[in-house]
Amino acid sequence: MVIHHLNCISTCPLCGRLMNGSRHGIFERGSLACHCVLIETRDSLVLLDTGFGLRDVADPRSRLSRFFLGLVSPAFREEMTAIRQIERLGYDPRDVRHIVLSHLDFDHAGGLDDFPEATVHLLETERAYAAAQRTWMDRQRFRPQQWSTSGKWRTYPDGGETWQGFAGVKALAGLPPSILLVPLRGHTLGHAGIAIETAHGWLLNAADAYFDAREMNANPQCHVGLRMYQWMLEKDRRARLANQAALRALAQRRNGVLVFSSHDPSEFERLADRAADVPAGVPASRHDL
C-alpha cells in the first residue's frame, strides 16, 4: 500500500491571526489546508475526501455560496485539485475507483465530479441530512451542484463494530478491511473519520472533528477564530465535544494510532513533508506503508 497526502486547495479565512495565530495579521487572511489522502491498493486508487474540484476552480460562483466564498476565499489553483495532483504523481485518474467521504461540506466534496466512475462511500445520515437543505446554513455549506455523481453513492446505515473505543465503525464494500469509516457525529450529523491500517500502525483522518492540532494536547488549546468557526458549523455540540475528547484520549495513548485533521496546515506539512501550497509530486510525497 502506498499513501500520498494531498492539499486540495487551501482556504484563506478572514482575520488570519485569529485563525493561525501570529503567522498572520488581524487584517490579513489566514490559511487552512484541505487535507485529502490518496491510497494505492493492489487493484485501484482510493481517495479520502476530494477537496475542491476543477469545476469549482473554473466557476466558483455557480458552485459555492457567496457567504463562504467571502468568508474563506479559497486559493483556487487548478494544479492543487486532486485530479491534477494524481496526474502529477503519474497515475491515471480513471483508476480512482473509490472515494470515501468524511462529510458533504463544500470543501470536501467539490472534486466528486472529476471522478465520475468512482463509487462514493459515506454515511446515510450525512447524505439524507445534506440533501434535505433544511436551514440557511445547510444551503450554504452543502452544495448539490457538486453532487453529479450521486447515482454512484454507496451509503451506510447506523450500527457497526467497535474500533479503538469508537462505535458504529464500518468496513466498506469493495475496499480492503484496512480502510474503515468511523462515525464522529457533531460537525455534521453524519460526519465520519476514516481509519487506514498501515505497516507502521493506524492513521485516523478525523476530518473536521477538530481544526487546531493543539486540541489533541492533554491541555487543549485552539485559536479563537477556529473555535468560533467550529461553533458556527456544529450540528450537535454535545456529540462534537464528546468525540473530540475521545480523539484526544486516543492521541494521548500513543498506541500506534496517529490522528490528524483536515484543516491544520502544520499537520499536513508534517505528514506530507512539504509546504501546504506545493502540489504533490514524485518522490517527495511518497510513503510506502
Image (spheres, rainbow, N blue to C red):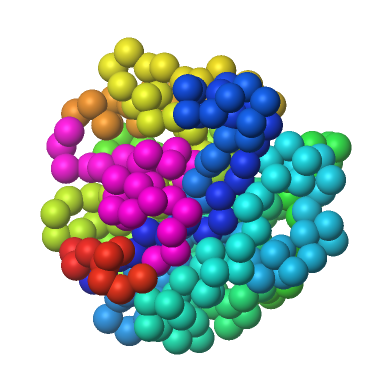
Instruction: Reply yes or no: does residue 274 show up in magenta.
Output: yes
Question: Is 84 positioned to the left or the right of 228 in the image?
Answer: left
- The answer to which image quadrant residue 247 occupies is top left
**143, 272: nearer the viewer:** 272
Residue ID at (78%, 41%): 70
- The answer to which image quadrant residue 63 occupies is bottom right
Residue ID at (52%, 50%): 34
Instruction: Reply yes or no: does residue 28 show up in magenta.
Output: no
Q: Quadrant of the N terminus?
A: bottom left
Q: Is residue 166 above or below residue 180?
A: above
Residue ID at (62%, 41%): 12
Residue ID at (83%, 57%): 61
- The answer to which image quadrant residue 81 occupies is bottom right
Is residue 104 visible to us here? no
Residue 37: horizontal and vertical position, in percent?
Answer: 40, 60
Q: Is residue 15 above or below residue 83?
A: above
The residues colored magenta run 254-280
Q: How many numbered marks, from 0 up?
A: 0
Residue 221: horizontal and vertical position, in percent?
Answer: 41, 17
Q: Is residue 35 above or below residue 99?
A: above
Q: Quadrant of the C terminus?
A: bottom left
Question: Is 267 positioned to the left or the right of 30 in the image?
Answer: left
**157, 220: nearer the viewer:** 220
Residue 155: horizontal and vertical position, in percent?
Answer: 57, 61
Residue 95: horizontal and vertical position, in percent?
Answer: 45, 84
Question: Is 264 positioned to the left or the right of 73 in the image?
Answer: left
Is residue 52 visible to us here? yes
